[in-house]
């Protein structure tokens, strides 16, 4: 019987089962492409459930500031230091601490910070690629003349 916590094997198994998550969304204001938290959750959820892994967030620190918008409204900015602990069925766990930031003109800045923190914790812990790996057999070299 091994003394190695099962969480390490579980995380490795998750890594082997998840697909790449492309940067298929575009921010309309700044024009950059990104992977949304929904994309990450939709890819990970069935694999985490299959591999008996779940995640518990803990906000360690939070700062809130307010900034005026161009239109005269108020923008709420939240920065959270969050510990995400990944557990498996024997109780073993691994934690990742990340910073999440969110801005909103309503009541969603903290939720956005938590969601962004979760997305980046998962991207890092599971090393989620942005593109599918290139198929080594997709191209074949032609015959070489002697």
Image: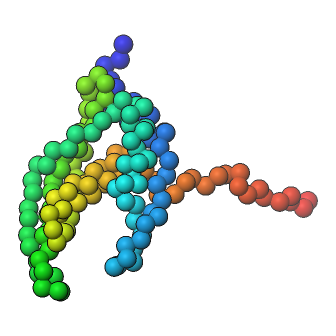
Q: Measuring 31% from the left and 29% from the top, which residue is drawn there?
A: 88
Q: Furthest-right residue in view?
A: 146
In which quadrant of the rendered view does residue 57 lie? top left
Residue 96 spot, x, y in % from top left = 24, 45
Horizontal side of 80 relative to 48 (left or right) equals: left
Which quarter of the image is occupied by the N terminus? top left
Residue 19 spot, x, y in % from top left = 50, 47
Residue 25 spot, x, y in % from top left = 43, 66
Q: Is residue 126 among what the camera can see?
A: yes
Question: What coloring was used for the rendering?
Answer: rainbow
Horizontal side of 125 relative to 61 (left or right) equals: right
Q: Measuring 21% from the left and 48% from the top, which residue is drawn there?
A: 97
In which quadrant of the rendered view does residue 5 lie? top left
Q: Is residue 99 among what the camera can see?
A: no
In which quadrant of the rendered view does residue 87 lie? top left
Which quarter of the image is occupied by the C terminus? bottom right
| Residue 43, above or below 90 | below
Q: Measuring 16% from the left and 72% from the top, which residue is drawn there?
A: 105
Horizontal side of 131 relative to 101 (left or right) equals: right
Residue 69 spot, x, y in % from top left = 16, 82
């Amino acid at each position: 019987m091994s003394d190695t916590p099962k969480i390490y094997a579980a995380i490795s198994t998750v890594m082997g089962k998840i697909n790449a998550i492309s940067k298929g969304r575009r921010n309309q204001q700044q024009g950059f492409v990104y992977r949304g938290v929904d994309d990450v959750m939709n890819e990970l959820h069935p694999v985490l459930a299959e591999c008996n892994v779940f995640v518990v967030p803990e906000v360690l620190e939070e700062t809130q500031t307010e900034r005026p918008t161009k239109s005269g409204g108020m923008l709420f900015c939240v920065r959270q230091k969050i510990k995400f602990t990944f557990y498996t069925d024997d109780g073993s766990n691994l934690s990742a601490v990340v910073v999440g930031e969110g801005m909103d003109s309503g009541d969603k800045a903290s939720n956005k910070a938590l969601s962004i923190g979760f997305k980046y914790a998962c991207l890092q812990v599971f090393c989620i690629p942005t593109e599918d790996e290139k198929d080594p057999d997709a191209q074949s070299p032609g015959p070489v003349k002697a």
